[in-house]
Amino acid sequence: MAIVSNISTLFRDEAAGGAVPDATRTAARSYTATGTITNLAGDLDTSKYKIASIPSDAILDDRTIFDVENWGFAATRIGTLDDVDALVSATTSAATSQSPVAFGDANHDKELWEVLGLAADPGGNITLYAHGIADAAGAGSMPFRIVWLYR
């Protein structure tokens, strides 16, 4: 085996003239939005619940979690205003919580716009919503914690 000397993605490959690493990855701060959204038993299909607005180029952290066990809808859908399930799509009874990012998974170290499946960074903030895709099964609540890294 060869003896090698290599660098992580946090450094510029000077010999190859590589790109300068993004400041979000090298000197980011951690931000947290925590709260609860609630629904009533009479809430209907296509109801929407504004959760939080986050910079489009922020990196979602694996500490992001939605506690869905008491959500009043049979399905949990979290996304943007136009894409109801871009972040979370699950049967509410399938788990007590949903995390859209796990350390080392396909969404690890991706910016919010990438995790949402957008073709390009729209810039500015992206607002996340929970959506009712059928009438509510009962009143409920969904505590959440969204953690992101940003420069």
Image (spheres, rainbow, N blue to C red):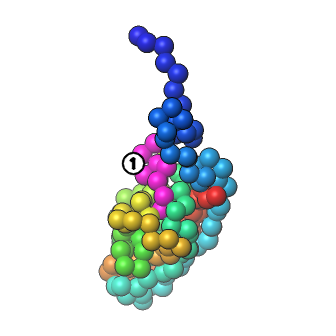
Q: Is 36 part of what is drawn in magenta? A: no
Please tell me which residue is depicted at 37% across the width and 59% down the height of the picture. Answer: 94
Q: Horizontal and vertical percent for residue 37?
A: 54, 76
- The kind of secondary structure the magenta stretch mainly shows is loop
SS of the residue at dot 1? loop
Residue 11: image quadrant is: top right
* Residue 96 visible to the viewer: no
* Residue 15 visible to the viewer: yes
- Which quadrant holds the N terminus? top left
Q: Is 111 part of what is drawn in magenta? A: yes
Foreground residue among 118 and 108: 118
- Which quadrant holds the C terminus? bottom right
- In the picture as drawn, the residue positioned furthest to the top comes out as 1
Foreground residue among 20 and 143: 20
Please tell me which residue is depicted at 52% across the width and 21% down the height of the picture. Answer: 5
Please tell me which residue is depicted at 64% across the width and 62% down the height of the picture. Answer: 32
Q: As drawn, is 35 to the left or to the right of 69? A: right
Q: Horizontal and vertical percent for residue 8?
A: 53, 35
- In the picture as drawn, the residue positioned furthest to the left comes out as 134
Q: Which residues are magenta?
A: 104-112
Please tell me which residue is depicted at 51% across the width and 80% down the height of the picture. Answer: 50
Amino acid type, residue under disc 1 in the picture: Ala
Q: Horizontal and vertical percent for residue 90?
A: 36, 63
Q: Horizontal and vertical percent for residue 78?
A: 42, 70
Residue labelled with disc 1: 106
> Is 139 rendered above or below residue 110?
below
